[in-house]
Every structure is written in structure tokens, then in C-alpha cells.
Amino acid sequence: MSHARDRLHGRHEHGHAHGREHTHAHFASQVREENERRVLSVLVLTGGFMVVQAVGGWLAGSLALLADAGHMLSDTAALALSWTAFRLARRPADTRRTFGYYRFEILAAFANAIALFGVALWVCVEAWHRLRSPVPVLGGPMLVVAAIGLLVNAVCVVILQRASGNNVNLRGALLHVVGDLLGSVAAIAAALVILATGWTPIDPILSVLVSLLILRSAWNLLRRSAHILMEGAPEGFDARRLGRDLSANVAGVSGVHHVHAWLITAERPMVTLHLEVEAGADASAVLATAKHRLREHWGFGHSTIELEHGRCADGHAPGDQGCHESPGPNHAEARSHTSHAA
């Protein structure tokens, strides 16, 4: 009778879990589509003003404007890459890419971080040449173009800041636009100094300061996207704490090992693990309860769990040191009690 209740509970829990996962997937899809539209809007604004700023910087002889135009050229390409990543992520999983195309977003974020480093380096080199051989700068036209740029970039920042989710790709796009915003502020400050004093070295000096600020953000983006590409665990994840939690809160579990957690994107954490099940425990109830715990308490919407009665399927007795070695998230798990939750 007890086993019958457990099986009924397991089916009931599975139905609720399936409903919650479907609702979450639908909401996540809506968020991604909205973020995609926001990136496209910013792409159009940035690309259009980039041409205006490049022409204005060339006519005024301002490195600050040309540097900001260079940022915007990089940003236009980066935003186009980000938008493409959102589009590709819509494609369903297939036999070659069983997790779909979400990872392209992380590649886009990584490429954007590299691009930011390249632009900052170019600005610093050009500033060095300008400091050694100053050139005339027209403060009036420079001020007008920079003020328009500040307005355009502020609108772009607001559009992206109102986007939802913890998307690394979106953060990369936002960092590019924030860099443009800072560039416009620097150009305005330089124009005012030149108009007031005629001291043109302020133009390359402020350009370098902005580039250094951008480099800090670029490094954080590079580190975060590289962590995901290297199959890094979600921030703050502790495999031993997860094992203790499941052992204490899932009836019938006597041990947890072979725990592997990683990220497809920042919003899509994955986990695989082995559960040692006590003799007489109902496997379906243990599996359902463990998945519920992983989803609701730990945030893992997708989990792959292998249930073990006695000896570890990888050839080690439960508790042996070898049972805790990590073969990686792609190790074979197609066994009788393996379960997937999309």
C-alpha cells in the first residue's frame, strides 16, 4: 500500500513538474524574444549614429570622437553578433546539437569581450601618437556631435537595461553601449576644455581614461563567458553541500556522488549525479522527490539522475574514493534508472 502511494505521489509530482517546466519554458521564450527586439533596436540606433560620429570626428579632427566612432563600429558588429545569437538560439535541438544552439550566445559574448580589448588598444596607441604630435581640434563641431551621441547612447542603455534575465550575451551588448556612453561624455568634456582653454591634449588623455574603464568591464565579461565555455559550475555551487542536502531531504537516499554541474548559458544550469538508494525504497518516488528538490531549491530545471542499489555502476562500491572521480558531464548515463527533465 505504501509503495502504491509512493508511485501515485511520483506520478502526481511528475505532472506538476511538467506543467511548471512548460510554463517556465514559455515565459523564458517570451523574455528571449523581447530581449532580441531590444538588441535589434539598439543595433539600428548605434549603426546609424556611428556614421554621423565618424564624419564629425574626421571634420573636427577629434580623436575622442573618432575613438567613440571606433567603439560604435565595434559595437555595431557586436550587436549584430548578439542579435544573430538570439536568432540562432530559437533553433530546436537536433541530433548533432542535443542542447540546441544556446551556446552561440556565449561565443558571441566572448567575441564581444575580445573586440572591446582590441578597440581599447587601438585608442591607446592612437592617443600616444596624438600626444607626441598634437593636431588641431575644432571644439564647436566636436561638442555638437558628442552631445547628440550622448543622447543616442543614453536611449540605447535604457533600452538594454530594461531587458530581463541574466543573459551574458545581453550583458556583452550593454557593455559596448555603456562604453559608447562614456566615450560621448569624455568627448563633451574634452570639447568644453578645448573651447575654454585651447588645450588639445585633453582629447587623447580622456580617450585613454575611457578605454581603461572599458577594459575592466571587458575583462569581467571575458572571464564570465570563458567560465561557461569551460563547463564551469554555476556561481556559488557546492557539490558537497548539494549531496548533504539531498541525503537529508530525499527519503530513501543514503548517499550522493558523481555530481557534475555546468552551464549551457547563464540561465540554463545543468546537473548530473548518482543517488545511492536504500534497500526497499521506491525508485520512482526517490527520483521524483530528488528532481523536485533540485528544481525548486537549487534552480536546476534539467537534471540527469542515476539511481544505484548497492554497487556503483561505474565499478566502485558506494563510498569508495573512485566513486567520486569526475569523468565529465558527457559520460555515458543511458542506464535503466537514468531520467531526463528537459
Image: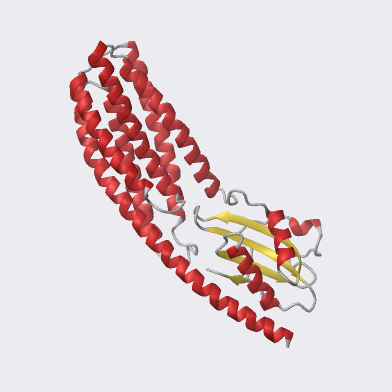
Left or right position of 70 against 175? left
On screen, residue 164 above or below 128: below
Q: Residue at x 33, y 37 (%)?
A: 74
| Colour setting | secondary structure
Exactly how many numbered labels are in the figure?
A: 0
On screen, residue 25 above or below 242: below
Residue pushed farthest bottom? 1
- Name the foreground residue: 311 vs 154: 154
Q: Residue at x 28, y 32 (%)?
A: 69
For residue 77, say whether it is visible. no
- Name the foreground residue: 257 vs 278: 278
The quarter of the displayed image where residue 13 is located: bottom right
For residue 71, say whether it is visible. yes
The quarter of the displayed image where residue 129 is located: top left
Residue 332 at x, y percent in the picture: 64, 65
Work out which quarter of the rendered image holds the N terminus and state it: bottom right
Left or right position of 62 against 84? left
Residue 44 at x, y percent in the picture: 25, 46
Q: Residue at x 67, y 74 (%)?
A: 337
On screen, residue 96 above or below 120: below
Q: Residue at x 55, y 72 (%)?
A: 17
On screen, residue 102 above or below 22: above
Residue 321 at x, y percent in the picture: 80, 56
